[in-house]
Amino acid sequence: MSNAVIILAAGKGTRMQSDLPKVLHAVASAPMLVHTMRSGEGIDAERTIVVAGHGADLVEKAALDYNSDAQVVLQTEQLGTGHAVEQARAALSDFDGDVFILYGDTPFITHETLQSMKDKRDSGASVVVLGFTAANAGGYGRLILADDGSLDAIVEAKDATPEQLMVNFCNSGVICAPRDVLFDLIAKVGNDNANGEYYLTDIVALARDAGMTCAAVSCDESETMGVNSRVDLAVAESTFQFNARHAAMINGATLTAPETVFFAYDTIIGRDVIVEPNVVFGPDVTIESGANIRAFSHLEGCHVSKDAIIGPYARLRPGAEIGDGAKVGNFVEVKNALVAEGAKLNHLSYIGDAEVGKDANIGAGTITCNYDGVFKHKTIIGERAFIGSNSALVAPVRIGDDAMTGSGSVITLDVPDGDLALGRAKQVNKVGFALRLMNKLKAAKAAKKKD
Ligand code: UD1
Ligand code: MG
């Protein structure tokens, strides 16, 4: 049976103290909403419905930016989780399969956990709820099990008896049921409870009343962590980073000081990559095997090929494509540029909107002048070209294969293959001038003292 996910994301998130809707606050460079959408991908969700309310326009944009096939439905008033799910009824009217309810502020539910819920569904339970054993059950809904181990009911903390409050097996909120069952039950949910809300959780007791079997599946509490405040957000970030560092190392990367390396939600790191201390990966970075990312480098939107060396103190911006064994050294910034195999940009350069040929050598202080204030222009540097230190390459411009530029040149014209370009004032030496000048100045100083 195919899967769909409904992601509840209408809440305001008052405790975030923010103008931004809660689910758009980022963990590992992606809105929490995107993390939840990725959880859905893990079970090959055919349909993704996001229920938006507060800041719906922004939530919709973020959802569609990530997955243009997602559907966003509006919950104008937040009357409870059951009411939120109800808003997805029409969007799923033509869907036949299992529906998972996920939360935009609960970013860490794993594919494996959702799969174990799916397995439980396949073994005959109509409604499957994800539970966890809480260190401090507090305000969570309690999962009440029947004698046979099946799930009898979910009781919200506010509506629970003292005896039920003793239970520490809690509701994560994540629920899976076939579409028809889910919406038939939701239609029966009322709001006669302590909060006056339509509780999604009531569908368990309603299913039992209708003679259906309900089941609970358990996961670790850390997975079900929800974010309600900036403090929780920081905990979520550190949890993510801890797991990402662990996974990178397990998969064969060396992190010299893992606690100082920050990954994005989608960083891909190959085997035998070495990441030195204090490296930050923004979104959309792939590092191939054997590359070395040296200390204090910042990378985003880039691809680093085999055995390349980046940094220390390098900055790779979106569109940086670094070839096999290429070197991008200290205080070098690369943006939207192809740096071919074996090329060297070792010190203090800005290379933007450019192509750097195979085995080219870019001297210290080379700048591609790519922007005229309105348009961006391209610089092409040929294979084995040698760019003298402190060259300014004024784009659009092409430096040929095996060509050279003299240090300190301002290059405004194309340089043919194999030529040397000198774009600087010619040097003139004045014989003995320096010595004569110095003596004159010293004499003037001595005369001044006597006065
Ligand atoms: C819910 C569960 C509780 C569970 C807990 C886990 C219900 C009734 N209770 O309680 O059993 O232990 O989650 O964290 O479901 N939302 C909407 N629209 C609404 C209401 C909520 O989109 O009208 C969204 C919220 O933005 C939030 C999520 O649904 O992301 C959960 O709502 P929340 O109010 O936090 O429910 P809890 O009281 O925490
Ligand atoms: Mg909550």
Image: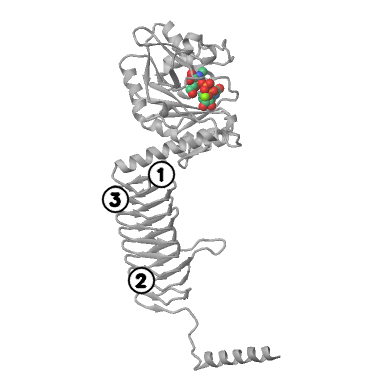
Q: Earlier in the sequence, mark 2 or mark 3?
A: 3
State which quarter of the image contains the C terminus.
Answer: bottom right
Mark 2 neighbour density, 10 Å: few (under 14) some (14–19) many (20 or more): many
Which residue is at a point 35% across and 11% down the rendered structure image?
149
How far apart marks 3 and 1 lie (CA) works out to: 21 Å
Answer above or below: position of 242 versus 347: above
Q: CA distance from mark 2 to mark 3?
A: 27 Å
Q: Which residue is mark 1?
A: 259
Kindly identify the amino acid type of the residue bearing the numbered disc 1. Glu
Closer to the eye: label 2 or 3? 3
Q: CA distance from mark 2 to mark 1?
A: 40 Å
Residue highlighted by disc 2: 385
Q: Which corner quadrant of the image does residue 181 belong to?
A: top left
Residue 203 position in % (x across, y down): 46, 13
Q: Residues within 10 Å of mark 3 (few under 14, many from 20)?
A: some
Closer to the chain start, of discs 2 and 1, is: 1
Q: Position of residue 57 (x, y in %)?
A: 57, 35
The answer to whether marks 3 and 1 mark residues whose Cβ atoms lie closer than 8 Å is no
Which amino acid lies under the numbered mark 2 shown in the image of this protein?
Ala
In front: label 3 or label 1 = 1
Disc sitting over residue 289 in the figure: 3
Residue 370 rendering spot, x and y as whole percentages: 49, 64
The N terminus sits in image quarter: top left
| Closer to the eye: label 2 or 1 | 1
Q: Residue at x 61, y 37 (%)?
A: 19
Mark 2 secondary-structure assignment: loop
Residue type at mark 3: give it. Answer: Ser
Q: Are marks 2 and 1 in contact (CB under 8 Å)?
A: no
Q: Between disc 3 and disc 1, whose residue precedes?
A: 1
Left or right, 121 with respect to 22, comes to left
